[in-house]
Amino acid sequence: HLVDYVGAGLLRVHRSVFETVPRPWFVWTMERRWEDGTAPASPMSEDFYLSEKCRRYGIQTYADMGIRCGHITDATIDETGKLVLRRV
């Protein structure tokens, strides 16, 4: 499925993306400006930054909706969004 943004917890990127899109690839946007000097509309995580930067270079982002995975943060969250384990 064609998507606007994708998280990097389970990410596969074709090598040509890194050959086409200049560094930096993963940046928290509140710390930087785009190459054209404009600031992002809102803070954006490093994985969404890569998705947005790819779009600016004409590269589309796709997600395989058949793959399920959780997310680890201050707590572990499963693919349904349910809190599974709280870190101590």
Image (spheres, grey):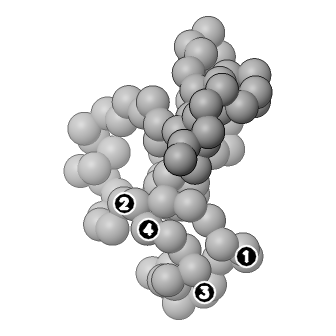
Name the quadrant containing residue 70. Answer: top right
Q: Residue at x 61, y 39 (%)?
A: 86
In the picture, measured across the screen, residue 53 lies left or right of residue 2, that is left
Q: Which residue is mark 4?
A: 27
First of labels 1, 2 by sequence position: 2
Q: Residue at x 62, y 65 (%)?
A: 44
The amino acid beneath tag 2 is Trp
- Work out whether residue 1 or residue 56 is closer to the camera in this orientation and state it: 1
Indicate which label's residue lies in the foreground, 3 or 4.
4
Residue tagged by mark 1? 41
Q: Is residue 49 left or right of residue 17?
A: right
Residue 6, located in which quarter of the rendered image?
top right
Instruction: Classify residue 18 as left or right of residue 12.
Output: left
Residue pointed to by mark 3: 38
Residue 9: tell me if it is visible: yes
Q: Residue flagged by tag 4: what amino acid is it?
A: Val
Q: Could you give the CA–CA distance between mark 1 and mark 4, rounded to whole angstroms?
A: 15 Å
Q: Nearer the viewer, mark 1 or mark 4?
A: 4
Q: CA distance from mark 2 to mark 4?
A: 6 Å
In percent of width and height, residue 64 lies at: 57, 18
